[in-house]
Amino acid sequence: MTMFFTNPASPIAGRPGANAHDGARRPSLAARVLSDCAVVAGILAILAAIAWLVPAINAPVGPNGVPSTISTDPVNLPYYALRSVFRMALALLFSLIFTFAYGLSAARSRRLGKVLIPLLDILQSVPILGFLSATVTIWLALFPGSMMGVEAASIFAIFTSQAWNMTFSFYRSLKSEPVELDEAARNLRLTRWQRFWTLDVPNSMIPLIWNMMMSVGGGWFFLTASEMISVGNHTYALPGIGSYVAAASAEESPAKICWAILTMVIVVLLVDVCVWKPMTAWAEKFRITQSESSTPKRSVALTLIRQSHIDEWLGRLLRPVGDLLERVTRPLGRTGATWGARPGRRRAGDIAFDVTVGALVTFGAAELLVAISHSTGLGELGRAFGLGGITFLRVALLTLLCSAVWVPVGAIIGMNPRISRLVQPLVQVLASFPANFIFPFAVMFFVTCGVDINWGSILLMALGTQWYILFNIIAGASAIPDDLVEMSKSLRMGTWMRWRTLILPAVFGSWVTGGITAAGGAWNASIVSEIVSYGRHTLVAHGLGSYIAEATAHGEGMKTIIGVAVMAIFVVAVNRLFWNPLQRLADRRFMVG
Amino acid sequence: MNFNKLLNAVASETRTGGATAAATRTRGRRRTNPDFADLDANATHTVIEASHISQRFTSEKGHETTVLDDISFNLHEGEIVAVLGRSGAGKSTFLRILAGLVEPSDGQVSYRGKALDGPNPGVALVFQTFALMPWLTVQANVELGLEANGMPRAKRHELALAAIDAIGLDGFESAYPKELSGGMRQRVGIARALVLRPDALFMDEPFSALDVLTAENLRQEVLKLYQNRENAIKSILIVTHNIEEAVQMADRVVVLGSHPGHLIAQVPIDLSRPRDKHSAEFEATVDRLYAILTGKSRATDSQKSEKETARPRNSNKPSPVSSTSVSLSTADADTMKRQDNETVGLLPNATPGGLAGLLDVVSNYPVGVDLADLAADLSFEVDDLFPLIDAGTMLGLMTVSRGHCTITRSGERWCHADVLDAKRLFAGLAMEHAPLVRTIDHALRHHPDKGLRGELILDLLRRQHTDEEARLQFAIAVTWGRYGELFDYDADDDRLTLDEANR
């Protein structure tokens, strides 16, 4: 479970009933009409943008084939940004659909779950290039002669950087549904459709939205790789802000890169204000805990929508659709309508299932080994493991360094509510800003100062993943109970003693959560951090990431497979052998409260 | 379950009831026993019929534990049945099996003559923790079940409003559960069940999460709703660990014994309604239920005395309190050879501190005190009080006879001892009377390192009990052992060691 976020890192637990009280003081009529105008304008703008973009997406491929670069005129940046956001949104939509389907099947079918969850663990440790090299030809063949093929490949690539942690989060939520709510649903004999919308989705909403935010952040990070697709000695470039940065960097134009960074900052902020803020504020109503807490989450956009009449209109408009869907889905049956097979027969089925799956996996692994020994020889596997070891050391060092820096800083921020209120939104925005946009500057710095990329790549990987540690620590530190802090003061503990006995143990659990995410992210980031270029300079570090990236670019399929498989093995093994025991320890010993 | 034996047992209990209790009992009691027989014989108005249901769990290691053992039970139209039992009696499992939420390992449940293979369509359930969807308004929560039945929007709106009004929630339709107090939330839970016009309203400790006054108020409301025929609730099954609640509400009380859950007695309550809690009959019935419940708590050696109080007993089982022999030698042949036939009885879930507090209270009554009064004094419910009583009787600190408890000499001594003496006394009593504590102590003494992995003891317990129960037993034994300075446990290394003082 690499990039998976369980703890909605929020010290603010939402005031119960905050939403319901909004109706208590009704806004004036003028305010309502103004809100209506704003919301309608917003909807029209979105529709217009879609209508404008869609023809371009489906444009035929020109006589010279798919272009391998794009114009770097900064005037185009708003258009590129729009294209990138659109791509991101579509990928997110597909991720959501995938999440619901995959999560439901894994959670509801015991046997499928035994296969799907380990598979998901592997899928999320496969770097984006692995998916791209395997599928890009399929996408191009699906939409011959249209830019739609490349577009689809790009959206798929973004999808693969978004979907897995969302699916894990949804699966976890399904598995940890409160028992009594599940019993109530079955006792009321809800239909499956009804249960999905009244129990499954609401119950998973808060962690799911947090993971969607993370996913989009991850998607931005791999935007360059997904928009400027280099597979098998070919480069396909799509208009988008990621391609722009790659092209500008190839032109060695720092000014243009700065323009792209500025655009990206604006996009991240806009998305935060218009999408995530309202969504997280809205999702507070799905919080199950009854606990009272300090400040309610607010969002200007949400208030605007709530003030307008739009929700009522939409409600009235969609009600018949809802009723129809409700009737149409009735044949799906009721939730838990029958108990299923008796234990004896169930066990026999389990054994048959396990044997089949086991045989298939063994057969697949054997076939792969045979194929490897025929094409590149098994020695290649050894080489990949060696390179994996190097990347492993890099990831380990990075995790240590980031922890050494950000644990103290995060704890100090988190324990001071005033600072943390200011800093936390900033950290969240920083975390979703794609760090690889500043890689060109880092490369310039490495080249001028003569820094070895073998070390420098650690910095590059850290740029993208350090935030996970920081904002988990902030959340953990701000959850330390006040009376424990007061106790440490009243005992006149020295600074070091206070850290040793109170703060560090209290944030240990958050550190583990952040560390898993950061380390997993770093493995994936290695494919864009171990090989970086700026104009004529291309710096390549020894490591598994550069191995995969080069194999993909040169179209060496078998090497790509080997690299991806080895990386998956490393990530899964480190999680199982290192992080999972730590997490258990954290749950057992270091739970605060 | 052998019905005739049960019937005889109930009858004999009535005949041989204690002198004081017998005096207060009405002649009605005797008269009702035939009714009881009639009720079960008359199958035409049976709503739910459970025959020979058992529930067993198989752990990962293949050990099987029984949670419910061979229970047959019928729920009839027009009655309120209370299911009473102490913790570990499987009351909630029993309710869930009847509601079709859990599949029984053996036996069959039928609703109106039709065998269940999924949730019982005639049952609406009210939960202890309310189980409302927090993201839906009161109205939407109440409408859920109707929507599931495919009722049109307007119609279900109307019915839900009527149910909300009936339970006194009008004005709260658009509130979210988070905004309501516990009592109001439970009203929503009840409205959600009522609106379905269930044949059987099932309530799983519905008032135990509420404060005393709110609970009392809501109990009365439920009774009123039930008596109002318009609401068409045909029967109510209520699981409770509050004896007064059972006597106040029920027409019949089903008493379950623990480890594994089994039927001890079915007691008809034919007091006229509304029932006066302070009437002599009411109090006598409460005392009697206390007596039935304490009877089943005794350790094996005191069971011969049960003959004279003649409690009804599940026919074919040797001993309801599972004093099971666990052979330690199979687990660790080297160290534990000697304990071959050591018996491991269940420890009640009580802390030495709680026990000391209870003894303090009991020692204020030189001639002893009725459990019912004790419970009322301390506002304890069955689950609070009985573990302490069990621990006290197990260790010989007090004796309980027919719901009346008295402190013993050694109880007095422990009560008045200073801290160190109290620990020493407790250690001695625990070694003598608490088999699991003794077992652990012996095993530690015979081990060359004077240390053992806790997992070893847990594994032994898991052969007889569910994992949860095994962990609980282990935790209790460790608490007792630590208090008595017999042995110590390091949770990080999972290591039991003999205490310095005990070497």
Image (tube, coloured by chain):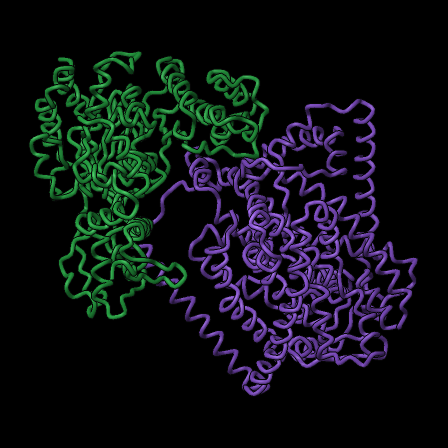
Chain colours: A purple, B green
Query: What x and y, as percent, mark residue A247?
Result: 85, 69
Residue at far front of view = B418
Residue at 21%, 57% (x, y): give it: B439
Position of residue B159 in the picture relative to residue B70 (left or right): right
Position of residue B465 in the picture relative to residue A74 (left or right): left
- Looking at the picture, tell me which residue is in the foreground, B3 or B251: B251
- Looking at the picture, tell me which residue is in the foreground, A318 or A456: A456
Position of residue A315 in the picture relative to residue B371 (left or right): right
Q: Residue B122, can we see it?
A: no
Residue at 11%, 38% (x, y): give it: B315
Q: Quadrant of residue A561?
A: bottom right
Residue at 70%, 73% (x, y): give it: A458
Query: What x and y, as percent, mark residue B211?
Result: 43, 25
Q: Quadrant of residue B445?
A: bottom left
Vertical placement of residue B18 versus A260, above or below: above
Instruction: Report the quarter where the N terminus of chain A lies.
Output: bottom right
Residue at 81%, 74% (x, y): give it: A443
Vertical placement of residue A120 versus B351, above or below: below
